[in-house]
Image (spheres, grey):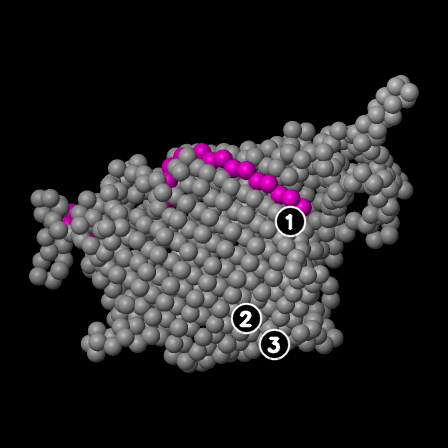
Amino acid sequence: MLLRFLFIVCFTQFTFAQQTIVGTVFSEGIPLEGASVVAKNSTLGTITDSSGVFTLILSNIKNPKITISYLGHKSYVKKIYKYDYNLGNIELVPDDELEEVVVSGTLKPVSKLKSAVAVEVYSEGFFKANPTPSIFEALEIVNGVRPQLNCNVCNTGDIHINGQEGSYTMILIDGLPIVSGLSTVYGLSGIPQSLIERVEIVKGPASTLYGSEAIGGVINLITKIPENASKISFDSFGSGWGEVNIDLGYQYALSEKTNGLLGINYFNYSNPIDKNEDGFTDLTLQDRISIFNKLNVGKRLSVATRYVYEDRWGGDINWNQNYRGGDEVYGEHIFTNRIEVFGTYEFNREFSFQFSFNDHHQNSVYGTTLFNANQTIGFGQLLWNIPIKNNDFLVGLAYRYTFYDDDTTATFNNTLGINRAERTHLPGIFIQDEIEFNKQNTLLLGLRYDYNSIHGTILTPRLNYKLSSEDESSTLRLSIGSGYRIAQIFTEDHAALTGAREVVFLNDLNPEKSWSVNLNYVHKMYLKQGHIFEFDASVFRTNFSNKIVPNYDTDPNFIIYDNLDGRSVTQGISLNFNALFRGGLRINLGATYIDSYLESAGSKTRPYLTERFRGVWKIEQKLRAPNLTIDLTGSVTGPLRLPLLGELDPRTPYAPTFSIINIQLTKGWNNRYDFYGGVKNLLNFTPAKNSIARAFDPFDRAVQFDEFGDAQPSPGNPYGLTFDPTYVYASNQGIRFFMGFRWTLD
């Protein structure tokens, strides 16, 4: 009896430790010979025979998953349970990113390959190579996209596309205009990347579909679908500077037809550091929480809400809230409260309604300058898709209401002593027709009509053409379009709020307009060895009229805003190279050259904070046996023109070419746990220590002024400077380590 008992125990243990899996792999009904079948996080694997059949023996693997892959096809991943022995027929879909669905280019789901509009797609995994607390910092490794800091004190910023200012970039969440106006300064930092399924980027004008602000391009943050998200996800990391970021996700079901996704992000940095010894914080202190919830009710209704609260301050290292708004110790302190509601209701496949609402409250001080502002934006849009033979029409009726009020001259009439909040009504209609002549030729035509209650009628047309080869390995896309933008200076340009300069408007500002052309070529190569190469090249040019330009040079005490009497041009070329090697090596390289200038009265000048050159890279090596991933990411940025305080200002008028390099090592366990860590800014690059002019005298007490209010040279101020934090081009954070942990439960 004892021997029989021991035999049963040993046999049972062996059975649970070893499991034989069989199956047959097909593609479009044809057996696939040579398809790879690998047990994740192990060295166990096999290939299919001439009949597409495979046999794989699993042993000593917890929570086993297998991955089946074949060149030019989307990989198939399956979790293996104890009762799984015969997986039957497995169909692989021909894809490998060729059939990736995008929506940003045409407002309709369409495969990336067939889209007439060039759309770049970046998955959640792409950004894990360089973990950041918000999507703002995460975009620094995307070619042609540059997060730009605009203030040395409070570290606010915006996102530039192909060298164009951040106010020309429209930020969408699930295709809806959520981040705009007042929130372009502080709303970006409250978007946690853990909730992002993918990021779609359209470079060039998209005003025909999205209206104002989409001159430079569109960044569409696609959030995760609740039913596709992990049951529970947790991601947290900290840095050597004392930054702590926590992301928590929870997927739940209220009923058979109602699924939800709850996401909470918390970020805290409470460690004042002054390594450049200018007396000011090198990094703004922040305490921020963001709560996101998304509900899918059946297949028709999707609605999401987000709440953001942030308390941030920067300034004199000795500042505290007792000095808020006073002239004893300089500080910039901002409270932000923001709520968003957005969603889509689909009546049927052809007819849908999109809606969004956001309410933004800001209570802030910049030294002694008080800035309290409220902004409410409501948006609704009806979309009607009408396919007729080779034509695919899309008709849209849109309405946008904006309420804006602050305590600056933007809404307060000093002469009459009356506060007049700005209320803008913007109804619009657009129509586009996508004509598919054949599989290789597609033409997209579009026209939008908007009526702004302040500025009147605005028309924005577009034309897109796609030509692809028969095997679809090469695609040429041409984009021509017009854009427009209605500026809100105090909500877009932080320099107008620092208190260091007085803001002057020479005239009533007219809407900016642009015409752009973009030629994009993509070629993919699938090598017999299993390697995949992709080349992507673009040539672009944008001509602006009525461009609103801040003038820092006429008088160091003023920022003078006016429409440019002339033209502004941004043109350049962008190159991308992506490679995937069978050994687990993935390389993404990108470079963009930009020629941007303002032309007025026969002279040309470069705009401020527009780089001449920018390069990015992301190199990933996966080591399967130890389940390690090594990521090297970085960027190099060419000279940026910087605002000076006059001819005597000793600071260099151009920022030096600089590079930021990051490295990360990730170790995974059991398909559930990831431990990661690394070093950011390996070269320890930081801007010059004199980036803030006269940081020791922020209230200009020791500055001598003439009768016109101009600063004069003096023994204690030989260059005639005043306090000014607008000379900024990069973060003051130097080299630092970070460590983090991820956990998911499917």
Q: What's the residue type where badge 1 is placed?
A: Lys
Numbered mark located on residue 395 in the image: 3
User: Residue 385 vs residue 511: left or right?
Assistant: right
Which residue shows up at 84% across the image and 24% down it?
Answer: 10
Query: Mark 1, residues whose alpha carbon is within 10 Å: few (<14), some, or many (≥20)?
Result: some
- Magenta residue check for 49: no
Gap between marks 3 and 2 measured at Cα: 16 Å
Q: From this view, report whether residue 265 is shown above or below residue 383.
A: above
Range drawn in magenta: 719-746
Query: Mark 2, residues whose alpha carbon is within 10 Å: few (<14), some, or many (≥20)?
Result: many
Q: Which residue is mark 2?
A: 355
Q: Quadrant of residue 33?
A: top right
Gap between marks 2 and 1 measured at Cα: 28 Å
Which residue shows up at 61% across the image and 76% down it?
Answer: 395
Which residue shows up at 72% across the image and 73% down it?
Answer: 390
Gap between marks 1 and 3 measured at Cα: 38 Å
Q: What's the residue type where badge 2 is placed?
A: Phe
Which residue is nearer to you in this view: 417 or 107? Answer: 417
The mark that comes first in sequence, 1 or 3, is: 1
- Magenta residue check for 744: yes
User: Residue 705 vs residue 430: left or right?
Assistant: left
In what element is the residue under mark 1? loop
Q: Which residue is mark 1?
A: 231
Residue 593 visible at all: no
Majority SS type along the magenta span: loop
Q: Position of residue 14 (x, y in %)?
A: 82, 27
Mark 3 and 2 residues: CB-CB less than 8 Å, in contact? no
Residue 590 visible at all: yes
Q: Quadrant of the N terminus?
A: top right
Q: Position of residue 366 (x, y in %)?
A: 26, 56
In what element is the residue under mark 3? strand
